[in-house]
Amino acid sequence: MKSVGIFLICLGLLSGCANSTKLSLYQKLDGKAGIGRIVDSFIYQIGNDEQIIHYFEHSNIAHFRQGFINHMCMLVEGPCTYDGDSMVAIHTGMHITEKDFNHVVDLLINAMNEQDVSHSLQNDILSRMAPLRDEIIKM
Ligand code: HEM
């Protein structure tokens, strides 16, 4: 009987532990620092890409970096506020094609691979971005 009691206490402690160590997506990405590293790789990818770079010809990259970090941080439910313009407002007039949209997603995947983000985390992030597609292309 005593050993059953001890077993139950251990089980309780273990499950308590498991709950308190359940990391959020934001934490798994190493928070804002990790997101910053992904976005830096992403910007580097864009900067070296002949198909995409022309969209950013007149952009303020420091502003884009900060806005994209905050936006991504918000998407993964981190403690950030994105207070920039809406996706529609920002991308309207760019006439982004489906092909270029997919290509930018590929660049983001390259950036996440470069930063050793696991495929399951990548899928989680991409599935949060996918619904934005219609607010971004052909605007
Ligand atoms: C799911 C995909 C995308 C997301 C989540 C996204 C998000 C954002 C965000 C948050 C900003 C604002 C940054 C700031 O505050 O300045 C931004 C700006 C911008 N995005 Fe996107 N974007 C996406 C796809 C694309 C694609 C496919 C292109 C081009 C092919 C693109 C081109 C741009 C450009 C050029 C800017 C800068 C605009 C400026 O200079 O004011 N974006 N994007």
Image (cartoon, rainbow, N blue to C red):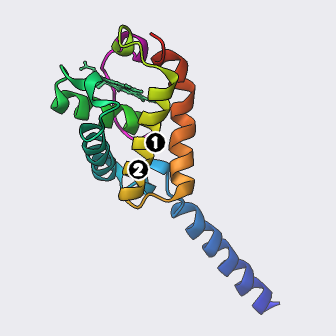
Q: On the picture, is 101 further left or further right than 3?
A: left
Q: Quadrant of the C terminus?
A: top left
Per the image, label 2 sits on a secondary structure element best described as: helix
Q: Along the line of sight, which residue is nearer the eye, 13 or 49?
A: 49
Quickly name the residue at label 1: 106
Residue at the location (83% across, 90% down)? 1
Question: As shown in the figure, which amino acid type bears the numbered disc 1?
Answer: Asp
Cβ(mark 2) to ligand 1 < 8 Å? Answer: no
Q: Main secondary structure of the magenta part?
A: loop
Q: What amino acid is at disc 2?
A: Asn
Q: Quadrant of residue 69?
A: top left
Residue 101 pos. (x, y %): 46, 28
Closer to the camera in the image, 111 or 25: 111
Magenta stretch? Answer: 75-89
Q: Residue at x 18, y 31 (%)?
A: 61
| Quadrant assignment for ligand 1 | top left
Element at label 1: helix
Determine the image quadrant of residue 90.
top left
Report if the CB atoms under discs 1 and 2 are less than 8 Å apart: yes
The residue to which callout 2 is attached is: 110
